[in-house]
Amino acid sequence: MSDVGEKGYTTSDDGSGSLPAETFERPKGFRGVYEHPITQVAMVGFVCFMCPGLFNALSGMGGGGQVDAKDADNGNVALYSTFSVMSFFSGTINNKIGALRTLQIGTLGYSLYIGSLLALNIHPGAGAFTVAAGAVLGVCAGLLWTAQGSLMLAYPTEGDKAKFIAIFWAIFNLGGVLGSAIGFGLNFHNKAGNVTNGTYTGFLVLTLIGACIPFFMTSPKKVIRTDGTRLTIHANPSWKVELMGLYIALKTDPMILLLFPMFFASNWFYAWQFNDFNGALFDIRTRSLNSMVYWSAQVVGSLIMALVLDRKSLSRRTRAFIGWFIVLVMVFVVHGWALHYVREYDRNSPIVLDQSLRIDFSDKQYIGRVFLYIFFGLLDAMWQTTVYWMMGAMSNDPNKLAYFIGYYKAIQSAGSVGSWRADAVGVPMVNLFASEWALCAAGLLFALPMIYLRVRPTTGLDEEVLARMDDDGHIQPTEVVAAKLEDEKAVA
């Protein structure tokens, strides 16, 4: 016997079930393809392809493509400061105004920021504009990534979450690949040390195109999952109840706190990788090439983790432990390898101070370093995919997932503020590298008990507290919700 719960859940007598309460026939023809959850997640991917993907392409070149990384560093500090604050509340905003509207607003800051870098290229004294644009982008990015994460994790069934993450991650990072390829082509003969105005202009146009894509996406309420269940989103009638949900999500599922160290480390490594490795050692065309292979490796890394984390022949807990172990091994292999190069230079080394001494892709010493950069890209994708999958293993409720993604991006951005600021003030490169390694190891160590205690074969209604919260913010018992819905069905 099973009881019907809200939001597509059923609960068995032991309270552990999570089968869909009601299934719907999927539409046929063009509408069936257009409203398919994979299509919609792919469209989210193309939004991020055009906006954050191209932003990443510039960041991956080191210093946002500038000779002196200081202005870009300060812009990133402003960006991730506002990003961190905004993300904490973005789940509430997402649940109140809807994921699509949140996504639409979130795309707007990327064009402004890239425009500020173009202005900096034309007027070297425009650093204040870059900082201000970074602060605006942080607000927008907090909204965009929360909407993206909630849709990406809510559309798939439990057994396909890693696949959907990989589809998104692959499309998103192809934006970085394309942007870097454009930068490589436009800067192939550039000896100036910073990217050309044409590069920034091209990126600016593409981000404006990306901002239009959310207006063509279908409403999440029309999307039917591959198992026939409909995505049901409950919008609370007041901001007060939504803010209560932000607190209740944390209070009733405190195991999410054990993922906070992984969240914090998840963008910390960018400052060292982009500025103190790629930006410090290579000329501008090689930096563009490195950025291209870095983001290409991200596509491969996400697909590898999808094969592991969605393997149907293994239990969800077993997959979680295997994924954790793979990431752990990658952290120590990649950083152990990087240590060989870290010892060779610092901020006052000739290669860092003199552009003419930078490594070109035609030089012999390039091969080992570019392969290390590829493995950093693999590790980044494996890390992010695993974090997203772990959150998806904790809930199927889009409202709860929006709060979780908000926590993730808030803590992640706080880490970014620390690393970019440390780089801006000239913390020794080896110290920044050591902190990156230590934070990654600590993040995995804290996540291990969460996997053991919280990841279960399936997610039941009894665990979905927000799915049982009424319009006044009161959490109803599972059996009360089930009985109420049964009565409503009988009347209908």
Image (cartoon, rainbow, N blue to C red):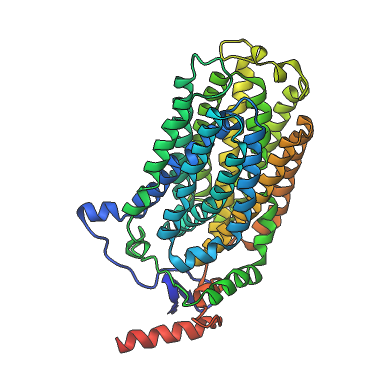
Q: Which residue of the protein is positioned furthest toward the left in this rendering?
A: 29
- Left or right, residue 441 beside residue 129: right
- Left or right, residue 103 beside residue 349: left
Of residues 451 and 477, the one drawn nearer to the viewer in this rendering: 477
Vertical arrangement, residue 355 with respect to residue 288, above or below: above
Residue in the picture at 58% in, 40% down: 130
Of residues 236 and 19, the one drawn nearer to the viewer in this rendering: 236
Which quarter of the figure has residue 256?
Answer: bottom right
Residue 42 position within the rendered picture, expressed as x and y whole percent measured from the top left: 38, 47
Of residues 203 and 28, the one drawn nearer to the viewer in this rendering: 203
Vertical arrangement, residue 199 with respect to residue 114, above or below: above
Residue in the picture at 56% in, 57% down: 405
Vertical arrangement, residue 446 with respect to residue 301, above or below: below
Residue 41 position within the rendered picture, expressed as x and y whole percent measured from the top left: 40, 51
Residue 38 position within the rendered picture, expressed as x and y whole percent measured from the top left: 37, 50
Vertical arrangement, residue 244 with respect to residue 310, above or below: below
